[in-house]
Structures are given as C-alpha cells and as structure tokens.
Amino acid sequence: MTRVASVDCGTNSIRLLVADLDPATGELHELDRRMTIVRLGQGVDRTGRLAPEALERTFAACRDYATVIRELGAARLRFVATSASRDAENRDEFTAGVREILGVDPEVISGDEEAQLSFTGATKELSGEHGPYLVFDLGGGSTEFVLGTDRVEAARSVDIGCVRMTERHGDDFVSMRADIKKALDQAAEVVPLDTGATLVGLAGTVTTVAAIALGLPAYDREAVHHSRIPLADVRAVTERLLGSTHEQRAAIPVLHPGRVDVITAGALVLLAIMERTGAAEVVVSEHDILDGIAWSTVL
C-alpha cells in the first residue's frame, strides 16, 4: 500500500482525497475525502481573471487540506486544477499561492487529460462488467466526455458547467438550453454520444440530482454511489428545480448550500446529456477525477 493525497481544484469546488492504494489489486482504502465550495471560477467567464476573493477562499481551503495531508502522512501529493484556472489570465498568482501552501505546483491540465483521469476514477472498480462506458464529468465550468472500455477511445471537453451556464444565462433557460445543445454538438464531433454505452455520471450536480431523486433525508455517499437513476426521475427533478425559488431549493436537505444557485443549470445539462444519448438511466459514481488523480501517482 502507498499512502497518497490528491487534490482536484475545479471551477466551483476544491476536493481532497487521502487514500492507501495497492496497484497490484486495484484496492483503494479511503482515509479522508472532503469538499469545500470555493467558487474559484467566480466571474472568469466575464473577466478572464480569477477574482481576489475567490483566490483567498481557495487558499484558505488549501491551508486546511495541508494540515490533513501532514497529519495523515501522505507520501505523494498531486494537485490538479481544471477549467477556471486553465482559462484565467492571472493563473500564475494561483500557482504561486498553492505552491507556498502545499509545496507542489498545481497542474493545470488540458480538458483531454481531465477526461482521462475522470474515466480512470469512475471505471476502475467496474472492471469492464458493463462496458463500453460513456463517462461524463459535469463540473462548474466544463463537462468532459470519455468513451471507452478498458482504455479511453475518445474524449472531448466542452464549456458547459453549472457555474458557467448560470453566470452566462441567469434564469434565461431557453438560451441556456440552446447553448447546451450547441456544446453537445461539439462533443459529438469527437465522442459518439449515441453508442448505447453504459452512461456513467460524475461530480456534484449528478450526485445531488441522484440524492434528490432517491428522496434521501440527508446526503448518503453509499446510497448514491452506483445508484441507477432513470431518465424520467432526472426529468422530474429538473422540472421541480425549474419551478422552485431560491428558498425552496435551499430547503432541500441533500443540497449543499454552495450549489443552491447553480443546481438548476447543472440539472438542465444532465437532462440534455441523457436525452441526447438516448440513455434510459445514468449510473452515478462517487469515484471520479479525484480517484483518477490518486491512481495516477502510482500507476
């Protein structure tokens, strides 16, 4: 076993996993997994820069994570940064802050590498039982699509995510749907979306919609992980969110406060993906790019 730490810093949240990994058996023993909403991508789509307050929220979370990593004694650490920091003009400021706190440079990876890490994390424990898989990682700023069975066959990242769609369109859901359709057309140029592959959905929007559909009284990772949510249930949850006020969404027990204002846009992206692929259901995975980052340190 090798004890490793992985950090996934996205547009909306930053997450930490500390785990013991056994490459020989494919076993991952989780020691600590946590998530903090930092909204690093606040305003990036409009200004092209990371906001000072967004950077400070992110650095505060990094300081907390540094304590956990030190106390658990991780031998390796990989920090991956995705859409927001990839797009920002002042990404060097972000890099310098992370290096000072955690002692490693954040790797601002391409959308294609992001997709491959997501695929590894989501499918490693599925062992080809239900392949091929069409994995999508619905983030804050972008969504990655990956098709494959034991390896990646096609991958594409497109700029639709719950934060980006909310900031770009607000409550104009007609224009939001048109934007989502255009992005799915772009993804389909590289990744066949209608192959009949098992559809596997990752990240906070998907897991939250699943928890709502399951009617959970509180968020339960074990109940959500590998749940199968039918298209009709995703459509019902999306319609519920479209018809709700901010206060009504905030009262949903499984909905993290940091997602209240962006979950509707995320649900619309999820629904559009399911309708476009023709999938009758989505397999929801709690194991995603964060797990893929961890495995990348030992494979």
Image: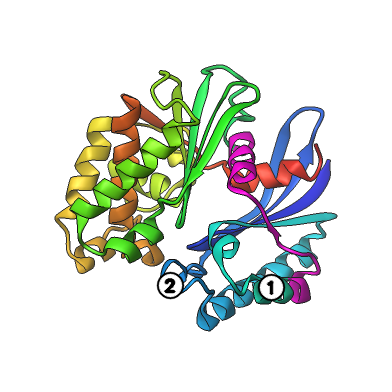
Instruction: Identify the magenta region.
Output: 99-121
111 relative position to 250: left or right? right
Mark 2 burial class by Cα count in 10 Å: few <14, some 14-19, many 20+? some
Front residue of 265/245: it is 265
Residue occupied by mark 1:
92
Would you place residue 288 above or below residue 85 in this image? above
- Viewed as shown, does residue 38 lie left or right of 108? left
For label 2, the residue is: 43
Picture quarter with the C terminus: top right
Q: Quadrant of residue 65?
A: bottom right
Against 47, residue 147 (above or below) is above
Disc ID at residue 179 = none
The x and y percentages for residue 84 are 53, 63
Q: Mark 2 vs mark 1: which is more N-terminal?
A: 2
Residue positioned 73% across, 75% down in the render = 96
Q: Amino acid at mark 2?
A: Gly
Q: Residue at the location (28% across, 55% down)?
A: 264
Give 62 or 172, whichever is nearer the viewer: 172
Cα distance, mark 2 to mark 1?
17 Å
Indicate the amino acid at tag 1.
Asp
Q: Does residue 215 show up?
A: no
Regarding mark 2 in the picture, which secondary structure is present there?
loop
Residue under the point 43% across and 40% down: 224
User: Looking at the image, which residue is at 42% across and 31% down?
Assistant: 188
Where residue 63 appears, x then y in whole percent?
68, 75
